[in-house]
C-alpha cells in the first residue's frame, strides 16, 4: 500500500487492546496503536470455526451476515505501518486475509475500512471453541472500552462455551 493518507483499519478481536496483544505475544514487539474510534462493522458476524493449535481450539473469523454487526475500533493507520498491522493480526489469531467492509462510527458516519480475518477452513473443523481465545477477546473488548453490553455478551459466551464443553467432557468419562 502506498500513499500518505491514513488507512482505515477495523479492529474487532484481540488487536482491540495493545495490552492483550502484548500479553499474548510475549516475545514479539507490538506496534504502537493509535486510539481508535468506536465503530461497528455492518453486515458481518463472528463465526468460531478456524482451528488454532496456538489457542487450543477454534478462533473467530468474520463472515458476511446481512443485518448483523460486530463491534470494534476504527483506527486510521499510517500507510508505512500496514505491514506491521498485517503481522500483528496474523500472529494474534491467524488473521491473514484482508477484507473490505463497511463500518459505522459512533458519530454515525458510514465508511469503508479493511479488517483482517482468518481464512475459511477447507473442511468442517472438529473440536472445541477456544475458551482462552473467547476470554482474551472479552478482555480486549473491555480494555478498549467497547460498550458494556457487548463486553458482557462476550464474557457470557466464554462462560457458556466453557460450561458446555466441561459438561460434554464429563459425559464422555
Image (cartoon, grey):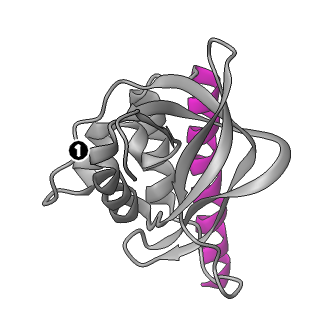
Return the residue at label 1: 31
In-front residue for pair 95/4: 4
Q: Where residue 6 appears, x then y in whole percent?
A: 40, 33
Which residue is at a point 31% across and 56% down the rendered structure image? 83
Residue 165 sits inside the magenta stretch: yes
Q: Does residue 55 appear left or right of residue 28 in this picture?
A: right
Residue 142 sits inside the magenta stretch: no
In-front residue for pair 143/32: 32
Characterize the magenta stretch by its predominant secondary structure.
helix
Q: Quadrant of the C terminus?
A: bottom right
In-front residue for pair 85/170: 85
Q: Helix or strand or loop: what does disc 1 sit on?
A: loop
Q: Does residue 152 appear left or right of residue 140 in this picture?
A: right
Which residue is at a point 34% across and 36% down the rendered structure image? 4
Count of number-bearing discs: 1
Which residue is at a point 44% across and 73% down the rendered structure image? 56
Provide the residue span drawn in magenta: 148-173
Residue 17, compared with residue 126, is above or below; it is: above
Q: Where residue 133 appears, x then y in whole percent?
A: 46, 57
Residue 53, compared with residue 85, is above or below; it is: below
Q: Where residue 1 appears, x then y in whole percent?
A: 40, 53
Crowding at dot 1, Cα within 10 Å, few <14 / some 14-19 / many 20+, comes out as some
Which residue is at a point 55% across and 47% down the rendered structure image? 114
Q: Does residue 48 appear left or right of residue 117 in this picture?
A: right
Of all residues, the one furthest to the top in this rendering is: 107
Q: Where residue 55 appears, x then y in whole percent?
A: 41, 68
Residue 33, compared with residue 125, is above or below; it is: above
Residue 130, compared with residue 168, is above or below; it is: above
- The image quadrant that residue 58 belongs to is bottom right
Amino acid at each position: 500500500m502506498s500513499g500518505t493518507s491514513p488507512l482505515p483499519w477495523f479492529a474487532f478481536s484481540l488487536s482491540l487492546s495493545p495490552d492483550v496483544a502484548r500479553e499474548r505475544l510475549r516475545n514479539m514487539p507490538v506496534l504502537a496503536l493509535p486510539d481508535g474510534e468506536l465503530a461497528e462493522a455492518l453486515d458481518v458476524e463472528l463465526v468460531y470455526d478456524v482451528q488454532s493449535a496456538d489457542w487450543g481450539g477454534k478462533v473467530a473469523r468474520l463472515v458476511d451476515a446481512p443485518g448483523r454487526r460486530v463491534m470494534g475500533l476504527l483506527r486510521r493507520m499510517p500507510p508505512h505501518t500496514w505491514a506491521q498491522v498485517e503481522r500483528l493480526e496474523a500472529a494474534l489469531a491467524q488473521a491473514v486475509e484482508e477484507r473490505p467492509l463497511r463500518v459505522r462510527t459512533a458519530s454515525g458516519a458510514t465508511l469503508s475500512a479493511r479488517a483482517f480475518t482468518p481464512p475459511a477452513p477447507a473442511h468442517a473443523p472438529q473440536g472445541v471453541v477456544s475458551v482462552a481465545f473467547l476470554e482474551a477477546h472479552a478482555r480486549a473488548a473491555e480494555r478498549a472500552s467497547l460498550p458494556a453490553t457487548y463486553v458482557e455478551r462476550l464474557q457470557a459466551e466464554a462462560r457458556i462455551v466453557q460450561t458446555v464443553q466441561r459438561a460434554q467432557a464429563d459425559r464422555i468419562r
